[in-house]
Every structure is written in structure tokens, then in C-alpha cells.
Image (cartoon, rainbow, N blue to C red):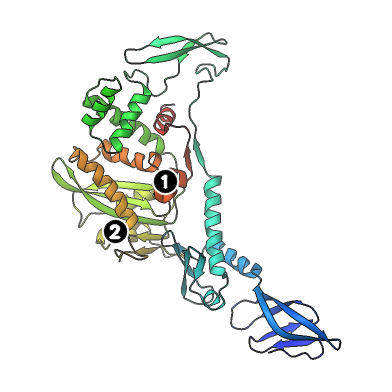
Amino acid sequence: MFYNRSRYVALYSSRLVIRNADRKFLSVFLPFGHGIGLVIHVYIFSTWLNITLIYPRVYYINVDNTIRQDKGKEIALNPNQQILRINDYTYHVKSQTTKREYDVIQTETGWICTCPDHSFRKICCKHIHAVEFSIKIRNEVRQRNEVMIEQMTNDKCPKCQSRNIVKHGIRHNQKYDLQRYSCKECKSRFSFNLGFEGMTASPKTITSAMQLYFTGESLRNVTKFLRLQGVNVAHSTVYGWIKKYTNLMEKYLENITPQVGNTWRADEVWVKVKGDKKYLFALMDDETRFWIAKEVSDKKEGHDASGLFKQAKEITKTSPKLMITDGLRSYNDAFLKEFWTQKNPRPVHIKHIRMSGDMNNNKMERLNGEFRDREKVARGLKKDDSPLINGYQIFHNYIRPHMGLENQTPADKVGIKIKGDNKWITLIQNASR
């Protein structure tokens, strides 16, 4: 309801006070019951009657988001104001003025929030802005700390680093040919075969065998494929390649820190080791699906999982804000020992997961399913530190693209970019340098 008296207009229904009534665009201050002052722009149609401005109706009200954006940025940057990422679409944001927590959910039409500001006014509230700022800040940090693993090039002399090199014939090995070079500066002759020196098979053959093995083929099926390519090797030779280069890449990659998120998941899956039933405990980042840490245990109940959590802290140089596991007591004991702190914001442990809804562990079960499918082909493992476990972790993180990550690898998501069409060769060469 509007009335005009001495250039003063009041809107009783929303408890707003509007000044300068002779303008079509007005700014209004809303101080009642919102915790913060909000500036609202009121757009109206007006008519002139006897040199008096009459307001028959308010047609459109647009809320200025500047203050809400500032408050959202303040929430995102406040270390004591916790924003918990539950899954790909749901976040928990604490209220600034009360002890309540609001759910910020991403839908097909955009973000929604359970706070009154969004529920009743259908506007972008400060909690939504806080989540958007949090995502933006996290992506900027990853880009700033991005690690680029470059493909080795054949344009420098390995002895004097001169680019003045020329081709100097072909070296004919027993199984493949290799281009030779000579340097015009230091007069040395060499060939580019970093990481594969002394190998009877070519780098392409070795990496093709590794790709086939970790995608699900048995060692004997791999040798059958290589035989069709004109390479006749025993299955034990292929196993030697996998063992050698898995150990080499593992030592190199453990020196690179992945930029993981603040929500982690842990679960276990049983495997056969020399015919005995054992359990593979694994810990994964929820946002990027990066497989952070693993360990093999003789038992499930009573296992001390603190070693798994401590290993994850050492690899990532950080701790999670939210830990999602099942109800196994080992996880709760390890969480209290490794992650719990009296300082705010305190980490949260969700241990009552369901088969559906927000509190599920489907991503971790998907990882377990991947490994079980590969382990079934091998019909069990020969030892606890089998190259199948270590190698599959490398394959999952750095080689295999995931549909849930827009056909990117978890390494791409945590800021570790591997160049080259053959990522196996790029990793092996950099690990051998």
C-alpha cells in the first residue's frame, strides 16, 4: 500500500520506507528481521496527474546482490565458518547468526538453499554465493599450484644440452629399430630411449602391454596380443615390465602433492592373497575421485586404520573437513586419532551411510568394483604389495579417464597434468630422468 505525502512514500505491507518519490528507480533499505541490511531496487510504472506523481502498482522488485555477495565472500574466506561439501551437488553452510545449518543444492535450473532468504524470496542468498566463492577459490588454488609433467622431446643433446643435433642413421636392435643422433657441438652420438635402455621390446610395446593388463586382460592374453603384433615374449617377461615400471613411477609420483578437496571417503574390499582372505582398505577424495592411500590388512574388524589416514595426510599435506565411511569402528577410532581437533572448524565424520540419498558411499563402492573386476581376472594376488594393487592405483589416478569427471583423469582434477598421447611413456621418462 502506497501513499504520497511531502515527497515521502511508505510501503506498509513489506515494512519498507521509500524516499525521493518522484523517481521511477528507487533504493530502499530493509533492516527488519534479516540480520543484515539489504538494498532493494524498486522499479515502478507511474503516471502524472495534476503535477502529482501517482503510483498505481509496483510491477517489479529486483534485489541488489552486492551486499549478499560480500557476505558470501566473507563466509567463504572465514576459517571458522565451515562449508562442508557432502557430494557433487550438496553443501552444508552454517548460519552466521544462529546455530542452524542450511543445505545448498545444485539443480538443473541452478542453486537452491533451504534458508528463509531463498525459500521465501526466491533470490540468490549469501549461502549460495559462499559456495560459489568457495568453488572458485579452490579452482584458483589448483591452477596456481598446477604440476605439469611434460613429454620428453628429442631436440637437445643429453650431454651438452645443445640443440644443434642431426640424425645419424638407424640402430637396429633385435626387436625394433631406434633412431640415432649426433651433436655438432660436442661430437657425441646418442639415441633417445630414456627409461627403456637395455629393453628388448620397444617403449610402445611395453606400454601397450601395461595398458592391456590394467584394463582387465590376463598376462597370457597380453602375450597373445603382442604375438599378433610380431612380438614374441613370455608372460613372465610382461610381469617383469609391469613390476619394474610400477615401482619406478610410484617412487616418482609420491613426491608430487595432489590438490584434493576437503571431503574424503574410505572403505574396504576383500581380496585373496595366496588363497587367504584379506582386506584392501582404500581412501579416496570425493570431489576428484583421486585414490589417495591404501593398505592391506589380515582382518576387517579390529584393524587399526590410523595408518591409512596418516598416510593420506602425508601424501596430501592436509586433512579433510568431512570424512565419509561406513559404521566400522576402526574408521571412527582412526578419525579421532588422526583428524579430530578441538580447534574450529572441527572436522565432521559421517559414518551412518545409506544405499541412496545424500549420505551414500557409491563413489567408493565404484572404486571397489573396479578393483574387484581386475582382481577376479588374476584369480587372487601373490603377495600383499602386489604390483597389481600399486599399478592399478596409478592407472586409476593418472591414465584412466572417468565419465563422471567429464572424461578427465583424477590427476587432471587435482592439478597434475600429464602431456603426450601416451601417458605411460611420459610418466616413465620423467621418472627415469
Instruction: Report the side of 40 relative to 185 (left or right).
Output: right
Instruction: Report the side of 88 relative to 111 (left or right).
Output: left
Instruction: Report the side of 364 relative to 141 (left or right).
Output: left
Q: Earlier in the sequence, mark 2 or mark 1?
A: 2
Q: Is residue 21 visible?
A: no
What residue sits 31% from the left and 29% below the top?
Answer: 209
What residue sits 56% from the left and 60% below the top?
Answer: 133
Check the image and report above or below for 354 versus 222: below
The x and y percentages for residue 72 are: 58, 66
Which corner quadrant holds the N terminus?
bottom right
Which element type, helix, strand or loop, lies under badge 1?
A: helix
Q: Quadrant of residue 39?
A: bottom right
Q: What mark, if any, has residue 243 been given in the picture?
A: none
> For mark 2, what is the residue?
331
Disc 1 residue crowd, few under 14, some 14–19, many 20+, Cα 10 Å:
many
Q: What mark, if any, has residue 410 been given in the picture?
A: 1
Check the image and report above or below for 345 versus 288: below
What residue sits 35% from the left and 60% below the top?
Answer: 324
Which corner quadrant holds the C terminus?
top left
The x and y percentages for residue 383 are: 20, 38
Task: Work out whether residue 182 or residue 21 is closer to the camera in this orientation and state it.
Answer: 21
The amino acid type of the residue labelled 1 equals Pro
What residue sits 48% from the left and 39% below the top?
Answer: 417
The x and y percentages for residue 248 are: 35, 31
Which element type, helix, strand or loop, lies under badge 2?
A: helix
Instruction: Report the side of 26 relative to 429 (left or right).
Output: right
The x and y percentages for residue 148 are: 50, 37
